[in-house]
Image (cartoon, rainbow, N blue to C red):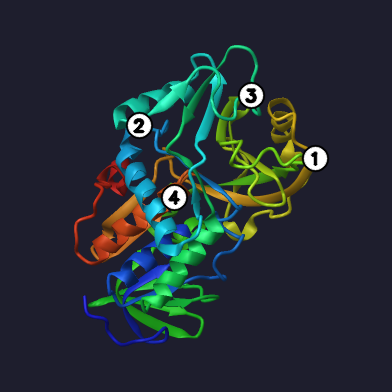
């Protein structure tokens, strides 16, 4: 596609609204394909005010959440490796993921089932990587997925944005889009310093999606979550010894990553019930009560760790069924919306960004994402 002239205060062929993980990946894919594209972000990016931060994010392929994710997971895994190779940076670390759950629990059962469906090797039983550092009650089952690991969200977003700019994209930081209006030949984006026109729009605004795509507002709810880090006093819990992990215990699924920075091992709780009406109203000041359950797990499952070193708040933007909403042309033939990632979307950003770019350029995505369409809600 031939690149058109234009600037932030003028016209772009394609506008990407929200430059967290999904938007930054889409902006990069579009720019590298030669598109005339501008991205808009209400803050600087990467930042800690949304859902794309926290030093590490798990990357899994044996996806316990359902076989509908397997093709997307496979494509994302390949693109994470490509991002490493093309940037020369270790944005993705394949340290594996260690799963542990009570015997017969859905977590380990569904991981094995997904691995079988995808043809992925997993190991079960004793002597798995990380088993000497992760203590589980008697009777727990363990599964190890080798072709998995962690991605660094801030580094990934920075890389995608850098690559996008190098390919000619414009990225307008601290430039919130207040409203999107349909015009005969596209859209008008209302900015604080004047309108911008675009032929096609991609909305990847996370928790702010309902402000821009009103039909989705009733479909999306927010849940506050807090990530917690614990000291690694002996330096034994790095990715060379400790895989990323998912543990089912009282309170639901706990996830975490080995020490890749000075704050140590990160642990978070996936399930919870702490609703928030809007991202702008989120309590971003973690307190001691936010570590309840997480600190208990750290003491029991990771006896080699030291005290809590840091906490960071984020939020999940939840869909009604906790599956993604990937809407391509449903609200408008020239609008795509990614929303409702429900706390497990980051790992798929490379493939979703690629699919958004394909849609915007009238190409066929490499992965069929129709199962995640908004139409499933009727």
Dot 4 alpha-carbon crowd within 10 angstroms: few under 14, some 14 to 19, many 20 or more: few
Judging by the rendered image, the residue that carries numbered circle 3 is: 250
* Mark sitting earlier along the chain (4/2): 2
Judging by the rendered image, the residue that carries numbered circle 1 is: 307
* Image quadrant where one finds the C terminus: top left
Q: Which residue is drawn at 29% across and 56% down?
A: 355
Q: Which residue is drawn at 53% across and 28% down?
A: 99
Inter-mark Cα distance, 4 to 2:
38 Å
Inter-mark Cα distance, 3 to 1:
21 Å
Q: Where is residue 264 in the image (x, y as percent from the top left)?
A: 70, 45
Q: Where is residue 4 in the image (x, y as percent from the top left)?
A: 27, 84
* Mark sitting earlier along the chain (3/1): 3
| For residue 235, side relative to residue 370 (left or right) | right
Inter-mark Cα distance, 4 to 1:
41 Å
Q: In the current view of this chain or complex, which residue is farthest to the top? A: 139
How many discs appear? 4
Q: Do the residues labelled 3 and 1 touch (CB within 8 Å)?
A: no
Judging by the rendered image, the residue that carries numbered circle 2 is: 120
Question: Judging from the image, what secondary structure is the residue with disc 3 in?
Answer: loop
For the residue pair 266 and 240, the one nearer the viewer reads as 240
* Mark sitting earlier along the chain (4/1): 4
- Residue 265: name its quadrant: top right
Judging by the rendered image, the residue that carries numbered circle 4 is: 218
């Amino acid at each position: 596609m031939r690149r058109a002239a234009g600037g932030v205060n003028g016209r772009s062929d394609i506008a990407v609204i929200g430059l967290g993980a999904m938007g930054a990946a889409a902006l990069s894919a579009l720019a590298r394909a030669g598109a005339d594209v501008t991205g808009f972000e209400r803050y600087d990016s990467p930042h800690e005010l949304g859902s794309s931060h926290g030093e590490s994010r798990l990357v899994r392929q044996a996806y316990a959440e359902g076989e509908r994710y397997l093709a997307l997971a496979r494509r994302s895994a390949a693109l994470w490796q490509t991002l490493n190779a093309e940037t020369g940076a270790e944005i993705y670390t394949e340290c594996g993921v260690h799963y542990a759950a009570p015997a017969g629990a859905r977590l380990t059962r569904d991981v094995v089932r997904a691995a079988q469906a995808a043809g992925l090797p997993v190991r079960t039983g004793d002597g798995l990587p990380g088993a000497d550092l992760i203590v589980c009650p008697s009777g727990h089952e363990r599964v190890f997925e080798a072709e998995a690991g962690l991605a660094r969200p801030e580094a990934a977003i920075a890389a995608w944005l850098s690559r996008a700019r190098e390919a000619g994209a414009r990225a307008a930081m601290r430039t919130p889009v207040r409203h999107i209006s349909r015009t005969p030949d596209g859209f008008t984006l209302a900015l604080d310093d004047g309108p911008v026109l675009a032929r096609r729009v991609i909305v990847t605004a996370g928790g702010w999606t309902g402000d821009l795509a009103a039909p989705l507002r009733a479909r999306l709810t927010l849940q506050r979550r807090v990530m917690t880090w614990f000291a690694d006093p002996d330096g034994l819990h790095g990715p060379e010894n400790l895989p990323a992990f998912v543990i089912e215990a009282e309170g639901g699924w706990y996830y975490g990553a080995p020490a890749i920075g000075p704050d140590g091992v990160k642990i978070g709780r996936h399930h919870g019930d702490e609703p928030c009406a809007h991202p702008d109203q989120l309590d971003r000041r973690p307190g001691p009560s936010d570590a309840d359950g997480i600190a208990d797990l750290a003491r029991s499952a990771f006896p080699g760790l030291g005290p809590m070193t840091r906490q960071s708040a984020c939020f999940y933007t939840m869909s009604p069924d906790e599956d993604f909403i990937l809407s391509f042309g449903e609200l408008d033939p020239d609008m795509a919306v990614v929303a409702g990632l429900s706390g497990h979307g980051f790992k798929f950003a490379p493939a979703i960004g690629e699919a958004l770019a394909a849609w915007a350029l009238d190409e066929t995505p490499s992965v069929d994402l129709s199962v995640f369409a908004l139409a499933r809600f009727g």
